[in-house]
Image (cartoon, helix red, strand yellow):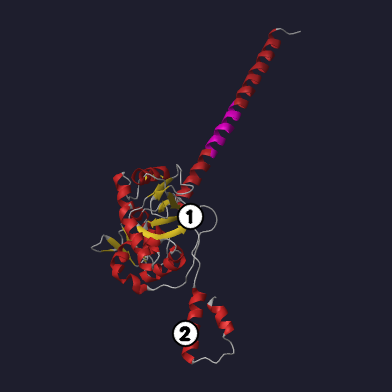
C-alpha cells in the first residue's frame, strides 16, 4: 500500500509525534519520486566559445578549446525529456570541480560555473537516471568529461586542417567529414547566422544508451560556408591554460579584423558622393552640348546648300532670259 494510502488510513488515530514525523518524511519522499524518463539516445554537445561570445553583451570567457555544453537524453521523434528532478547537490561533484572548470565552464562571466552545471543537471542530467552509468550526479558529469576527452573536437578538426582563423571559410560538409573520419559516424553541426559569413557554433555527437557512437538523426549536410573564428586579441588577458578573458565584448564586435567578424562595404563619404554627382552632371552636359552642336551644324549645312542652290538658279535665269 502506498504511503499516501497508509496516511489516509491513519487519520483520526492518535500517534506519537515521532511517528507522525516519520510518516510525513516518507510521504514527501514518495511525492518527490519521479518516474524514469523515456528517451532514445544521448547527445553530447560541444560549443565554440569564440562564436558564443561574438553576439553577447555580457562579460564573456573565451577559450581556445571546444567546451562542453551538455549531455542530453534525446528522442528521435517528439520532445526530449527535461526537468525530471529540480534539485542539484553540488557537493557530489567537488572531486572533479577543477576539471569541470576547464572543460565545462560557464562562458557568461556574470554567472558562476556551478549555475551552469546546476541548470544542465536539472534540465537534462536528472532525466538520465535510468541509465546505470549516469544514474548519479557525479557519474553523469564524469561520463560527460570522459566522452569529451575521448572525442576531442578541437583535436579532431585540427588533424583535418580545420583550424581557427579569421579569414578562411569551411563548408559544413568539411566539418562533417572531419568528424565522421574520426568517430565513423555523422554528427550535427550548428552555426550562427549573421549578416555576413555564418560562424561555426556547436558540434553534437550522438551516443547510444551504452555510450557507443551512433549516427545522429538527421545529420547536417550543407555546402554552406562558415567561419571558424579565432579569439579576439584586443583587451584580453592570457592565462596558463591558453584561455582569454575579456570584460568588454563590445570591443569584440568593433574589431572585425582581429575577431573574425565580417563587415559591410563602407559607404562613400559625402565628398565622394558629391564628386560622383558632379562628374555625372558634367558628362550629361557634355553629351547634350555635342548633340546641340551636331543639330546646329547640320541645320547650317542644309541652309548653305539651299542658299547655293538658289544662287545657281538665279544665275542660270540671268544667262538664259525668257
Q: Where is residue 128 in the image (x, y as percent from the top left)?
A: 44, 62
Does the magenta segment cover residue 291? yes
Quarter of the rendering occupied by the C terminus: top right
Q: Mark 2 and mark 1: span between their CA atoms?
A: 38 Å
Instruction: Specify start and end residues of the magenta stretch as a single range.
Output: 284-297
User: Does residue 278 appear anywhere in the picture?
Assistant: yes
Q: Main secondary structure of the magenta part?
A: helix
Front one among 290 and 39: 39
Task: Please give left or right for residue 94 compared with residue 82 in the image.
Answer: left
The circle drawn on residue 40 is 1
* Residue at x 37%, y 50% (from the top left corner): 228
Does the magenta segment cover residue 161? no
Residue under label 2: 22
Q: In this picture, is 177 found above or below 233?
A: above
Q: Position of residue 113 (x, y in %)?
A: 36, 69
* Residue at x 54%, y 39% (from the top left corner): 284
Task: Please give left or right for residue 282 compared with residue 310 in the image.
Answer: left
Mark 2 or 1, nearer chain start: 2
Task: Please give left or right for residue 274 compared with residue 5 in the image.
Answer: left
Q: Where is residue 219 in the image (x, y as percent from the top left)?
A: 46, 47
Front one among 253 and 291: 253
User: Does residue 112 appear anywhere in the picture?
Assistant: no
Front one among 156 and 174: 156
Amino acid at each position: 500500500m502506498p504511503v499516501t494510502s497508509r496516511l489516509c488510513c491513519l487519520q483520526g488515530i492518535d500517534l506519537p509525534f515521532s511517528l507522525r514525523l516519520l510518516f510525513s518524511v516518507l510521504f514527501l519522499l514518495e511525492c518527490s519520486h519521479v518516474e524514469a524518463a523515456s528517451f532514445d539516445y544521448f547527445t553530447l554537445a560541444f560549443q565554440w566559445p569564440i562564436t558564443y561570445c561574438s553576439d553577447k553583451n555580457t562579460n564573456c570567457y573565451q577559450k581556445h578549446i571546444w567546451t562542453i555544453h551538455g549531455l542530453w537524453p534525446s528522442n528521435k521523434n517528439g520532445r526530449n525529456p527535461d526537468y525530471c528532478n529540480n534539485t542539484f547537490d553540488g557537493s557530489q561533484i567537488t572531486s572533479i570541480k577543477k576539471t569541470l572548470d576547464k572543460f565545462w565552464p560557464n562562458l557568461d562571466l556574470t554567472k558562476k560555473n556551478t549555475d551552469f552545471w546546476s541548470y544542465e543537471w536539472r534540465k537534462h542530467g536528472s532525466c538520465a537516471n535510468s541509465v546505470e552509468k549516469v544514474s548519479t550526479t557525479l557519474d553523469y558529469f564524469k561520463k560527460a568529461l570522459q566522452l569529451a576527452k575521448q572525442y576531442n573536437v578541437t583535436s579532431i578538426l585540427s588533424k583535418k586542417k580545420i583550424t581557427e582563423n579569421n579569414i578562411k571559410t569551411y563548408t559544413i560538409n568539411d566539418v562533417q567529414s572531419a568528424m565522421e573520419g574520426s568517430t565513423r559516424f555523422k554528427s550535427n553541426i550548428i552555426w550562427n547566422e549573421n549578416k555576413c559569413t555564418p560562424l561555426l557554433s556547436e558540434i553534437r555527437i550522438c551516443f547510444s544508451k551504452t555510450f557507443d557512437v551512433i549516427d545522429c538523426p538527421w545529420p547536417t549536410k550543407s555546402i554552406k560556408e562558415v567561419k571558424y573564428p579565432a579569439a579576439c586579441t584586443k583587451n584580453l588577458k592570457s592565462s596558463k591554460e591558453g584561455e582569454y578573458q575579456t570584460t568588454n565584448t563590445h570591443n569584440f564586435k568593433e574589431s572585425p579584423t582581429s575577431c573574425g567578424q565580417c563587415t559591410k562595404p563602407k559607404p562613400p563619404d559625402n565628398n565622394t558622393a558629391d564628386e560622383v554627382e558632379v562628374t555625372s552632371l558634367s558628362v550629361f552636359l557634355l553629351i547634350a552640348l555635342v548633340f546641340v552642336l551636331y543639330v546646329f551644324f547640320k541645320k547650317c549645312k542644309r541652309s548653305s546648300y539651299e542658299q547655293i542652290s538658289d544662287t545657281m538658279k538665279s544665275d542660270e535665269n540671268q544667262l538664259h532670259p525668257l
